Amino acid sequence: MERNTGSQHLWNAGRFSWDLSQRGLIMGILNVTPDSFSDGGRFHKIETAVAHGLKMIAEGAEILDIGGESTRPGAEIVSPAEELARVLPVVERLRAESDVALSIDTTKPHIARAALAAGVDIVNDISGFRNPEMIEVCADTSCGLVAMHMKGVPQTMQQQAVYQNVIEEVHETFRQCLEGLSQAGISEERVLFDPGIGFGKTVEHNLALLRSLPELAIHQRPLLMGLSRKSFIGHVLGEMNLSYRENPTIALTAYTRAGGALVHRVHAVKENMEALRMMEALR
């Protein structure tokens, strides 16, 4: 069993140990998919994916989150073999060309295990580590973990967006998740939580969560926010064109940093990093 020191701003992830008490992190999104909602198909080939990853690093990303399966509402399920074929060559190339922290965005233990063996430092599981095998994979390493809240699966999640109290239910899900991870020997300092904005939630649910970030914290573990270009932004603004969602994303990065979110998963690295640093300077 690893020692729990209870440091609320420390995040341990493999080779990395970040003190987030004064300075948050930008996680750049690298979708190696043909059908992701924002940039599906743009970085599907290995060369373009690697080039884009290196560009995000140059712009200030300290973590790259690599995913090989779209999680947009109604997305098709990808076989483990196909997902692995998409992400593993990109992981291997980026690890060879950069020492930046790498994250694998997957719900499949087989993919996580292979990616960790190839040099990934973080497992980002949108299903919140509901699969005991995924917990076992992470317990066998020192990787960092990101546990997201989602009802159901991407194919059905928007049909399950019903809550008595969305704040309390997300908080309780995080509590149960951390308890299960701790029982498996995974220390709290390795775990971040993501409230899953846009995953099985209505616009009203998303806004309620954003207003109540401090209430979501479990043992004061840091929060990761995945807000970039989400459809609820379009619904709020009455404009569903993706090109109109970047400036609101930057505003939300600043707002959620003020609310205590310390890691921000974004498409446009430079702009969001600048918003993050300005908010931290004001604090």
Image (spheres, rainbow, N blue to C red):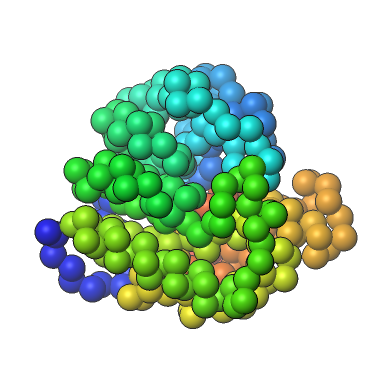
Which percent across, then down, holds residue 94?
39, 29
Please report the residue visible at 47 percent of the width from the left and 50 percent of the height from the top: 127
Please report the residue visible at 49 percent of the width from the left and 80 percent of the height from the top: 215
Is 207 positioned to the left or the right of 223 in the image?
right
Q: Nearer the viewer, residue 146 or 157?
A: 157
**Residue 191 image-quadrant placement:** bottom left
Which percent across, then down, holds residue 202?
71, 63
Quarter of the image containing the N terminus?
bottom left
Q: Is residue 223 above or below residue 243?
A: below
**Residue 212 image-quadrant placement:** bottom right
Number of labels in the image equals: 0
Which percent across, then down, holds residue 69?
55, 33
Asked whether the viewer can see residue 51, the reply is no
Q: Nearer the viewer, residue 280 or 210?
A: 210
Which percent across, then down, holds residue 189?
26, 63
Is 13 positioned to the left or the right of 185 in the image?
right
Q: Nearer the viewer, residue 78 or 23?
A: 78
Q: Nearer the viewer, residue 231 or 49?
A: 231
Asked whether the viewer can see residue 48, the reply is yes
Please report the residue visible at 52 percent of the width from the left and 77 percent of the height from the top: 168
